[in-house]
Amino acid sequence: MSYTRKCNECGQLISLREMPGGQWVAFDIGTDKPHKHFKENKINSKNSFPQEKIKKINEVRSDIKNAISRSQIIKIAYLDKKGTVTEREIFPINVIQDGDIRKLSAYCTLRNSSRIFIVENILNSELAGSMPNWFRERSEILSSDEKIESSKNEYNSDIGDLDDFFSTIKNMFKLFGIIILLIFIASFF
């Protein structure tokens, strides 16, 4: 198993891979070379996350929020898994929180398909106008399908809770029956 993220020490994109013994080892992206920190990229130890970076992340998040609520297109500069920066025009759908990672579900015009973007890998963003009608209609259908699926999941969850409840009641009656049987047997002695 492996995944990519930025190095805590130098900020460079790395690939973390799980070794057969269960330990995790950092490698440079696209290579089998163990990662070594680059001095020129080291983050200042007094301020582990530069204010400019925080400001840029907040601007990107704000643009995403506005684009979703107003059905607008965003032009982004995106850092992909390989460390390549690409310019893309996307139609954002929603933001998903996956553990510590915030992901953006969007339609990408560069790839002409739906994609998932890691929000922290969006280096720059700019609102670029309204989404075309064909996509707006499609996203409304998708969101209604998501609402239906969500209500199905809630319904199935409720049924699961009832199953757990009745299973507990059933087990209590079994236990009660065993106690009665033991009392009955003990009355003969």
Image (cartoon, grey):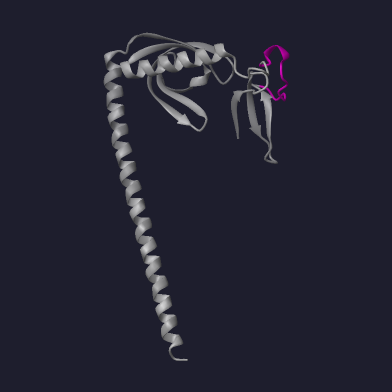
Looking at the rendering, the stretch of residues picked out in magenta corresponds to 31-43
What residue is rendered at 36% in x and 16% in y? 66
Look at the image and say whether residue 41 sits in the magenta stretch.
yes
Q: Position of residue 131 (x, y in %)?
A: 32, 13
Q: Position of residue 1 (x, y in %)?
A: 60, 35
What residue is rendered at 43% in x and 77% in y? 179
What residue is rendered at 63% in x and 17% in y? 47
Residue 78: tell me if it is visible.
no
Is 82 on the left-hand or right-hand side of 70?
Answer: right
What residue is rendered at 37% in x and 12% in y? 73
Look at the image and say whether residue 63 sits in the magenta stretch.
no
Q: Position of residue 151 (x, y in %)?
A: 30, 39
Q: Nearer the viewer, residue 147 or 1?
A: 147
Q: Nearer the viewer, residue 4 or 56?
A: 56
Please name the predominant secondary structure of the magenta segment in the image: loop
Against 188, is 85 above or below?
above
Residue 161: tell me if it is visible.
yes
